[in-house]
Amino acid sequence: MTGVPASAARRGAVPKPKAASTVRPVSLWNIANILTMVRLLLVPAFVLLMVADDGHDPAWRSFAWAAFTVAMITDLFDGELARRYDLVTDFGKIADPIADKAIMGAALICLSALSDLPWWVTGVILFRELGITLLRFWVIRHGVIPASRGGKLKTLAQGVAVGMYVLALTGPLATARWWAMAVAVVLTVVTGLDYVRQAVVLRRAGLSAEKATPTSKATPTSSGASARTPSSASSAPAASGRDGAGDGERDGDGDVDNAGPAGNTGNSGSAENAGNKRKAGGEGS
Protein backbone atom coordinates (compact mmCIF):
# COMPACT_ATOMS: atom_id res chain seq x y z
CA MET A 1 0.00 0.00 0.00
CA THR A 2 1.51 3.31 -1.05
CA GLY A 3 -1.24 5.52 0.30
CA VAL A 4 -1.81 7.08 -3.15
CA PRO A 5 -5.38 6.88 -4.53
CA ALA A 6 -5.75 4.57 -7.51
CA SER A 7 -7.39 7.31 -9.62
CA ALA A 8 -4.44 9.62 -8.98
CA ALA A 9 -1.97 6.86 -9.82
CA ARG A 10 -3.69 6.18 -13.14
CA ARG A 11 -3.49 9.83 -14.08
CA GLY A 12 0.15 9.94 -13.09
CA ALA A 13 -0.41 12.79 -10.61
CA VAL A 14 1.31 11.93 -7.33
CA PRO A 15 0.76 14.61 -4.69
CA LYS A 16 3.94 15.99 -3.18
CA PRO A 17 4.14 17.20 0.39
CA LYS A 18 4.20 21.00 0.64
CA ALA A 19 7.34 22.51 1.97
CA ALA A 20 6.89 24.44 5.18
CA SER A 21 7.02 28.16 4.49
CA THR A 22 9.81 29.89 6.34
CA VAL A 23 9.51 33.55 7.23
CA ARG A 24 12.76 35.29 8.03
CA PRO A 25 12.37 37.18 11.32
CA VAL A 26 13.33 40.84 11.10
CA SER A 27 15.45 42.09 13.98
CA LEU A 28 14.42 45.29 15.71
CA TRP A 29 18.03 46.45 15.59
CA ASN A 30 18.32 46.81 11.83
CA ILE A 31 19.83 49.72 9.94
CA ALA A 32 16.46 51.27 9.06
CA ASN A 33 15.24 51.32 12.66
CA ILE A 34 18.60 52.58 13.92
CA LEU A 35 18.40 55.56 11.55
CA THR A 36 14.88 56.26 12.81
CA MET A 37 16.10 56.14 16.43
CA VAL A 38 18.93 58.51 15.57
CA ARG A 39 16.43 60.95 14.11
CA LEU A 40 14.30 60.76 17.27
CA LEU A 41 17.35 61.43 19.44
CA LEU A 42 18.32 64.41 17.28
CA VAL A 43 15.02 66.18 18.07
CA PRO A 44 15.88 67.21 21.68
CA ALA A 45 19.48 67.89 20.66
CA PHE A 46 18.27 70.19 17.89
CA VAL A 47 15.97 72.10 20.27
CA LEU A 48 18.80 72.64 22.78
CA LEU A 49 21.09 73.95 20.05
CA MET A 50 18.38 76.27 18.72
CA VAL A 51 17.67 77.95 22.08
CA ALA A 52 21.32 78.12 23.23
CA ASP A 53 22.55 81.67 23.94
CA ASP A 54 19.09 83.25 23.45
CA GLY A 55 18.66 81.41 20.14
CA HIS A 56 20.34 84.00 17.92
CA ASP A 57 24.01 83.06 18.10
CA PRO A 58 25.21 82.20 14.55
CA ALA A 59 27.55 79.46 15.80
CA TRP A 60 24.87 77.61 17.77
CA ARG A 61 22.43 78.02 14.90
CA SER A 62 25.00 76.42 12.58
CA PHE A 63 25.21 73.40 14.90
CA ALA A 64 21.42 73.25 15.00
CA TRP A 65 21.33 73.35 11.18
CA ALA A 66 23.78 70.41 11.09
CA ALA A 67 21.55 68.37 13.43
CA PHE A 68 18.47 69.24 11.36
CA THR A 69 20.23 68.29 8.10
CA VAL A 70 21.38 64.92 9.47
CA ALA A 71 17.83 64.20 10.63
CA MET A 72 16.39 65.02 7.20
CA ILE A 73 19.02 62.86 5.47
CA THR A 74 18.16 59.86 7.67
CA ASP A 75 14.52 60.42 6.71
CA LEU A 76 15.49 59.90 3.06
CA PHE A 77 17.27 56.61 3.68
CA ASP A 78 15.54 54.65 6.45
CA GLY A 79 12.29 54.05 4.57
CA GLU A 80 14.08 53.13 1.35
CA LEU A 81 16.39 50.69 3.15
CA ALA A 82 13.45 49.09 4.95
CA ARG A 83 11.56 48.45 1.70
CA ARG A 84 14.56 47.39 -0.38
CA TYR A 85 15.98 44.88 2.13
CA ASP A 86 12.67 43.78 3.67
CA LEU A 87 13.39 45.35 7.06
CA VAL A 88 9.85 46.54 7.73
CA THR A 89 8.89 46.19 11.41
CA ASP A 90 5.96 47.34 13.55
CA PHE A 91 8.32 49.69 15.38
CA GLY A 92 9.42 51.29 12.12
CA LYS A 93 5.85 51.76 10.93
CA ILE A 94 5.02 53.73 14.07
CA ALA A 95 8.32 55.46 14.87
CA ASP A 96 9.21 56.65 11.35
CA PRO A 97 6.23 59.02 10.83
CA ILE A 98 6.53 60.21 14.45
CA ALA A 99 10.21 61.08 13.92
CA ASP A 100 9.40 62.90 10.67
CA LYS A 101 6.72 65.06 12.27
CA ALA A 102 8.79 65.61 15.44
CA ILE A 103 11.88 67.08 13.78
CA MET A 104 9.90 69.31 11.42
CA GLY A 105 7.47 70.41 14.14
CA ALA A 106 10.30 71.18 16.56
CA ALA A 107 12.07 73.31 13.95
CA LEU A 108 8.94 75.28 13.04
CA ILE A 109 7.91 75.90 16.65
CA CYS A 110 11.43 77.01 17.62
CA LEU A 111 11.62 79.40 14.67
CA SER A 112 8.25 80.94 15.49
CA ALA A 113 9.08 81.18 19.21
CA LEU A 114 12.27 83.05 18.26
CA SER A 115 10.21 85.39 16.01
CA ASP A 116 12.06 84.23 12.90
CA LEU A 117 8.97 82.72 11.27
CA PRO A 118 5.32 83.85 11.45
CA TRP A 119 3.13 81.60 13.60
CA TRP A 120 0.55 81.24 10.83
CA VAL A 121 3.14 79.50 8.63
CA THR A 122 3.89 77.05 11.42
CA GLY A 123 0.17 76.52 11.99
CA VAL A 124 -0.59 75.81 8.32
CA ILE A 125 2.22 73.27 7.95
CA LEU A 126 1.55 71.46 11.23
CA PHE A 127 -2.20 71.38 10.61
CA ARG A 128 -1.62 69.81 7.21
CA GLU A 129 0.85 67.19 8.48
CA LEU A 130 -1.31 66.11 11.42
CA GLY A 131 -4.47 66.20 9.33
CA ILE A 132 -3.06 63.94 6.62
CA THR A 133 -1.87 61.47 9.26
CA LEU A 134 -5.39 61.29 10.74
CA LEU A 135 -6.80 61.03 7.23
CA ARG A 136 -4.70 57.95 6.50
CA PHE A 137 -6.05 56.25 9.61
CA TRP A 138 -9.60 57.22 8.56
CA VAL A 139 -9.38 55.28 5.29
CA ILE A 140 -6.86 52.59 6.26
CA ARG A 141 -9.54 49.86 6.27
CA HIS A 142 -10.30 50.64 2.63
CA GLY A 143 -6.72 50.99 1.38
CA VAL A 144 -3.53 53.02 1.58
CA ILE A 145 -3.01 56.51 0.19
CA PRO A 146 0.37 56.28 -1.55
CA ALA A 147 2.96 59.01 -1.27
CA SER A 148 2.61 61.17 -4.34
CA ARG A 149 5.34 62.93 -6.28
CA GLY A 150 3.93 66.25 -5.12
CA GLY A 151 4.14 65.10 -1.51
CA LYS A 152 7.81 64.21 -1.89
CA LEU A 153 8.47 67.57 -3.54
CA LYS A 154 6.67 69.26 -0.64
CA THR A 155 8.89 67.47 1.88
CA LEU A 156 12.01 68.57 0.00
CA ALA A 157 10.79 72.18 -0.20
CA GLN A 158 9.98 72.23 3.51
CA GLY A 159 13.38 70.82 4.43
CA VAL A 160 15.26 73.37 2.31
CA ALA A 161 13.17 76.34 3.51
CA VAL A 162 13.29 75.43 7.20
CA GLY A 163 17.02 74.71 6.94
CA MET A 164 17.60 78.19 5.48
CA TYR A 165 15.62 79.74 8.34
CA VAL A 166 17.59 77.79 10.93
CA LEU A 167 20.80 79.36 9.64
CA ALA A 168 21.39 82.97 10.62
CA LEU A 169 21.28 84.35 7.08
CA THR A 170 21.37 88.02 6.08
CA GLY A 171 21.14 90.04 2.88
CA PRO A 172 19.98 88.37 -0.36
CA LEU A 173 20.01 84.91 1.23
CA ALA A 174 17.49 86.07 3.82
CA THR A 175 15.22 87.21 0.97
CA ALA A 176 15.75 83.91 -0.88
CA ARG A 177 14.67 81.89 2.14
CA TRP A 178 11.39 83.84 2.27
CA TRP A 179 10.61 82.75 -1.29
CA ALA A 180 11.66 79.18 -0.51
CA MET A 181 9.22 79.12 2.42
CA ALA A 182 6.46 80.58 0.24
CA VAL A 183 6.93 77.73 -2.25
CA ALA A 184 6.89 75.20 0.60
CA VAL A 185 3.63 76.61 2.00
CA VAL A 186 1.93 76.54 -1.42
CA LEU A 187 2.99 72.93 -1.99
CA THR A 188 1.85 72.07 1.51
CA VAL A 189 -1.67 73.37 0.88
CA VAL A 190 -2.02 71.99 -2.67
CA THR A 191 -0.80 68.50 -1.84
CA GLY A 192 -2.94 68.48 1.31
CA LEU A 193 -6.08 69.15 -0.70
CA ASP A 194 -5.08 66.41 -3.16
CA TYR A 195 -4.69 63.91 -0.30
CA VAL A 196 -8.17 64.84 0.93
CA ARG A 197 -9.57 64.18 -2.56
CA GLN A 198 -7.81 60.79 -2.73
CA ALA A 199 -9.10 59.83 0.71
CA VAL A 200 -12.71 60.66 -0.21
CA VAL A 201 -12.48 58.69 -3.47
CA LEU A 202 -10.85 55.73 -1.73
CA ARG A 203 -13.47 55.65 1.02
CA ARG A 204 -16.37 55.84 -1.45
CA ALA A 205 -14.88 53.02 -3.51
CA GLY A 206 -14.38 50.91 -0.40
CA LEU A 207 -17.94 51.43 0.81
CA SER A 208 -19.32 50.63 -2.66
CA ALA A 209 -17.28 47.41 -2.77
CA GLU A 210 -18.59 46.39 0.65
CA LYS A 211 -22.19 46.95 -0.44
CA ALA A 212 -21.66 45.01 -3.68
CA THR A 213 -20.16 42.00 -1.89
CA PRO A 214 -22.79 39.23 -1.55
CA THR A 215 -23.44 38.16 2.02
CA SER A 216 -25.17 34.83 1.32
CA LYS A 217 -25.50 32.28 -1.47
CA ALA A 218 -29.20 31.51 -0.92
CA THR A 219 -32.20 33.84 -1.27
CA PRO A 220 -35.45 33.18 0.61
CA THR A 221 -38.57 32.45 -1.43
CA SER A 222 -42.18 33.26 -0.65
CA SER A 223 -42.82 29.68 0.52
CA GLY A 224 -40.09 29.94 3.15
CA ALA A 225 -37.65 27.64 1.33
CA SER A 226 -34.30 28.92 0.15
CA ALA A 227 -33.71 29.13 -3.58
CA ARG A 228 -30.34 27.68 -4.48
CA THR A 229 -27.98 29.42 -6.86
CA PRO A 230 -27.50 27.83 -10.31
CA SER A 231 -24.12 26.46 -9.31
CA SER A 232 -25.41 24.79 -6.14
CA ALA A 233 -28.48 23.39 -7.92
CA SER A 234 -26.37 21.51 -10.45
CA SER A 235 -25.79 17.76 -10.36
CA ALA A 236 -23.21 15.98 -8.22
CA PRO A 237 -20.49 15.75 -10.94
CA ALA A 238 -20.90 19.48 -11.63
CA ALA A 239 -20.58 20.25 -7.91
CA SER A 240 -17.32 18.30 -7.68
CA GLY A 241 -15.97 20.26 -10.62
CA ARG A 242 -16.88 23.50 -8.87
CA ASP A 243 -15.02 22.60 -5.68
CA GLY A 244 -11.62 23.50 -7.12
CA ALA A 245 -12.62 26.98 -8.25
CA GLY A 246 -15.17 28.07 -5.66
CA ASP A 247 -17.91 30.59 -6.38
CA GLY A 248 -15.41 33.22 -7.36
CA GLU A 249 -11.98 34.65 -6.71
CA ARG A 250 -11.62 38.20 -5.45
CA ASP A 251 -9.22 40.27 -7.51
CA GLY A 252 -7.13 43.29 -6.54
CA ASP A 253 -9.93 45.76 -7.24
CA GLY A 254 -12.45 44.06 -4.99
CA ASP A 255 -14.56 42.62 -7.86
CA VAL A 256 -15.65 39.00 -7.88
CA ASP A 257 -14.85 36.81 -10.85
CA ASN A 258 -17.55 34.19 -11.27
CA ALA A 259 -16.42 30.67 -11.82
CA GLY A 260 -16.76 29.11 -15.27
CA PRO A 261 -19.18 26.33 -16.20
CA ALA A 262 -19.32 23.46 -13.78
CA GLY A 263 -17.12 20.49 -14.37
CA ASN A 264 -13.45 20.03 -15.15
CA THR A 265 -13.49 22.64 -17.93
CA GLY A 266 -14.97 25.30 -15.65
CA ASN A 267 -12.50 24.37 -12.91
CA SER A 268 -9.41 24.88 -15.06
CA GLY A 269 -10.79 28.00 -16.72
CA SER A 270 -11.71 29.74 -13.47
CA ALA A 271 -8.41 28.76 -11.82
CA GLU A 272 -6.47 30.16 -14.77
CA ASN A 273 -8.55 33.34 -14.68
CA ALA A 274 -7.97 33.74 -10.93
CA GLY A 275 -4.22 33.27 -11.42
CA ASN A 276 -4.14 35.96 -14.07
CA LYS A 277 -6.08 38.29 -11.77
CA ARG A 278 -3.58 37.80 -8.94
CA LYS A 279 -0.70 38.68 -11.26
CA ALA A 280 -2.42 41.78 -12.59
CA GLY A 281 -3.94 42.99 -9.31
CA GLY A 282 -0.77 43.58 -7.30
CA GLU A 283 -0.96 45.48 -4.06
CA GLY A 284 -3.81 47.71 -3.10
CA SER A 285 -1.71 50.81 -3.57
Image (tube, rainbow, N blue to C red):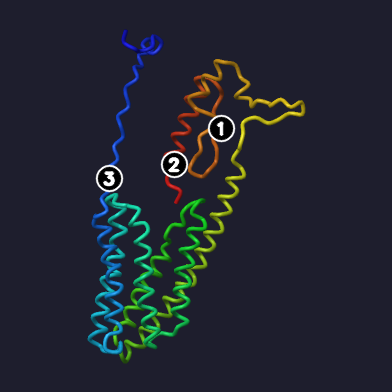
Task: Point out the tag, 3 or 1, that comes first from the N-terminus.
Answer: 3
Helix, strand or loop for disc 3: loop
Residue 239 appears at what percent x and percent y? 55, 20
Name the residue rendered at 41%, 75% in the picture: 184
Q: What amino acid does circle 3 point to?
A: Pro
Q: Residue 165's quadrant in the figure?
A: bottom left
Name the residue rendered at 77%, 29% in the picture: 222
Distance between the Cα atoms at labels 3 and 2? 28 Å
Depicted 154 relative to depicted 95: above or below? below
Residue 122 appears at what percent x and percent y? 43, 79
Residue of label 2: 280
Helix, strand or loop for disc 1: strand
Residue 131 appears at what percent x and percent y? 49, 67
Q: Residue 148's quadrant in the figure?
A: bottom left
Distance between the Cα atoms at labels 2 and 1? 17 Å
Name the residue rendered at 30%, 69% in the picture: 72
Helix, strand or loop for disc 2: helix
Q: What amino acid does circle 2 point to?
A: Ala
In the image, which disc is placed on residue 258? 1
Depicted 58 relative to depicted 270: above or below? below
In the image, which disc is placed on residue 25? 3
Q: Nearer the viewer, mark 2 or mark 1?
A: 1
